[in-house]
Image (spheres, rainbow, N blue to C red):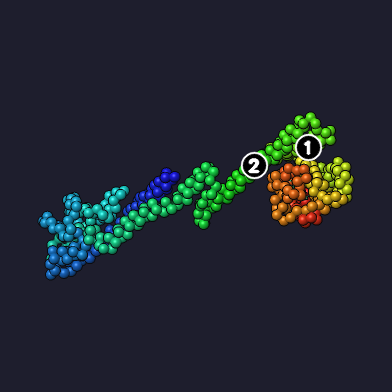
Amino acid sequence: MKTLYVKFVAITIGIMLLSSIIAFLLSNAYYQQKLKPYNDEKITKMAQSIAAYTDDHPDVDLPEYLNSISSIGYQMFLIDKAGDETFYGAPFRVNSLPASTRAQVLDGHVYHGILHFPQALFITGFFANELKNTIGVPLTHNGKQYALFIRPDIKLLFNEMHLLFAWLLGLTILLSILLVLFGTKYLVKPISTLTHATKSLAEGDFNVKLAVNRRDELGELSRSFLGMARKLEQMDEMRKEFISNISHDIQSPLSNIKGYTNLLENESLSVEDRRQYTSIINDEIKRLSTMTKQLLLLASLDRNDQMLEKKPFNVGQQIKELVRNYQYLVSEKGIMLSYSLPNVEIIGDPSLLHTVWDNLLTNAIKYNKQDGSIDISIDEKETEGGGAILVTFKDTGIGLNQAETERIFDRFYRADAARTRTIEGTGLGLSIVQTILHLHHGRVSVESQYGEGTAFIVELPAK
Ligand code: ADP
């Protein structure tokens, strides 16, 4: 965590340094290419006008005149043919000047020391306070020949304005470093919070709190993280509930079996009782066996490793065969079963879809009333995704209330115990139905009227 912060700060300051070096090099190049000739020319003109003035005004006092000019920001060096040297203004740091140069200017030539000052990478010639870095012009005063070397006094030129700019630059750098230090803290903080949240999540504490009102990528990340935490929490809840349900559902048939085997040990039991107890034990064993099979199926569906063996087949045909198998049970309960099952081909796993119809049909029989009715139909429907088929199982059974319809697809959920106690079941059938349909990109919905009947509608993508 810390390292990200340090890295960010280091990179930003590094970028600032690098860009100022590049900016410095570029402006130096700009000085060398553009400003230096311009500067040279400007000072040459200025020096020449000084020379012209002294030439035109023999009565002016030369040292006084030059002194007054130097006081407004120039350094000057004056020599005459006799070798007399006078400096005006601030002293030069380096005073050497070749004799040939002096002689040339005394002979009437102009010396462009500023233009020809050697280029240095990091020091712009502008700042080099050397006698060589001047403009030399011949000057005549009262008929006497002189050479005048002149350059602007940088120190004097660095007046308040320049100081102001220097402060500005210094403050900008300082402030940007400070802001980077604090700004990065602010940027990196949500990541630290996230790490913290991840740790508490890993320890099983799902109640993580994150600021999700940021509008940037980190806000987005926090939001998805919270979403993930909620999902994990739900899954954890489901897992706990599942284990408690399953333990209960295994425990109750087992204790029933134990109770009745104890009773069976009684020698004086009548044949009738004995038969009844054995039958109860058998039923409980059957229930346990059904439940384990259903759990295994659900587990393999959940793991998704039950590879769907999809192929085209006729659903209408499949359901008709199923109905035939249950004919006995249907007539036993006096149920009227009607259907409209056209030959419709779909692509799917026939064995898994068989489980779906089987569950829906047995429910429609189990939760029906004496002499009730069941109607099964297949309809085709136009959808955006290229059509679907609707398979409806409608019964006139005990029905479900609103709260129950919302929960019947939950694992182990069985509606109102008082009504269904006598009816065999595990509460797993409909969750299996739902899972299988999900794997087929289909869905199941329910419409029910308490005490009137229920309809389950399965929607599957058409072939
Ligand atoms: P099971 O039938 O083994 O109890 P299911 O998952 O198939 O489990 O069904 C869950 C619950 O939904 C049932 O216990 C029952 O209360 C309710 N149910 C399912 N089908 C019907 C139906 N056709 N009519 C009324 N209630 C139903």
- Residue 312 placement: quadrant: top right
- For image coordinates 15% across by 58% down, the residue present is 87
Residue for badge 2: 244
Residue 268: x %, y % from top left:
80, 31
Left or right: where 179 falls relative to 448: left
Please, which residue is most extreme toward the front here? Answer: 268
Left or right: where 307 falls relative to 63: right
Q: Nearer the viewer, residue 436 or 115?
A: 436
Residue for badge 1: 280
Circles 1 and 2, Cβ within 8 Å, touching? The answer is no
Structural distance between the alpha carbons of marks 1 and 2: 24 Å
Left or right: where 104 falls relative to 40: left
- Residue 254 placement: quadrant: top right
Residue 196: x %, y % from top left:
48, 46
Q: Earlier in the sequence, mark 1 or mark 2?
A: 2
- Residue 317 placement: quadrant: top right
